[in-house]
Amino acid sequence: MTKNQSVTITKKVAKHGRQTIIVIPTVLSNIIRHGMLVRVTIDILENKEFIEELK
């Protein structure tokens, strides 16, 4: 993967103890490594409670 190339994934948010997490797929482990700087943008696609709060 070249510099500044983007990958889009759609994931369900998971729970790990008290933490809410997003698990990066294993297939990306060759591309994304510990210590790398990445940009994560979160678009909420489905959340009825959140949508009601916005109204």
Image: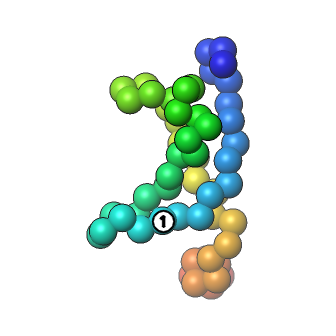
In the image, is residue 1 above or below residue 16? Answer: above
Identify residue type, mark 1: Ala
Q: Is residue 15 above or below residue 48?
A: above
Q: Quadrant of residue 48?
A: bottom right
For the image, the number of numbered tags is 1
Residue 21 quadrant: bottom left
Q: How is the image coloured?
A: rainbow
- Quadrant of the rendered image containing residue 20: bottom left
Q: Is residue 4 left or right of residue 34?
A: right
Can you say whether 55 is above or below 20 in the image?
below
- In x, y percent, where is residue 8? 70, 42
Picture residue at 50% right of the left edge, 52% below the top = 23
Task: Give the residue number, with chain letter if any, for mark 1.
Answer: 14
> Residue 41, percent across and down?
58, 46
Locate the N terminus and report the quarter of the image it occupies: top right
Nearer-the-camera pick, 43 or 27: 27
Where residue 31 appears, x then y in whole percent? Answer: 56, 26
Residue placed at 52% from the left, 64% from the top?
A: 13
Residue displayed at 69% across by 66% down = 45
- Extreme-top residue of the structure: 2
* Mark 1 surroundings within 10 Å by alpha-carbon count, few (fewer than 14), some (14 through 19), many (20 or more): few
Q: Nearer the viewer, residue 10 or 49?
A: 10
Q: Quadrant of the C terminus?
A: bottom right
Dot 1: element: strand
Image vertical order of residue 51 relative to residue 7, above or below = below
Whole-percent x and y of residue 6? 68, 31
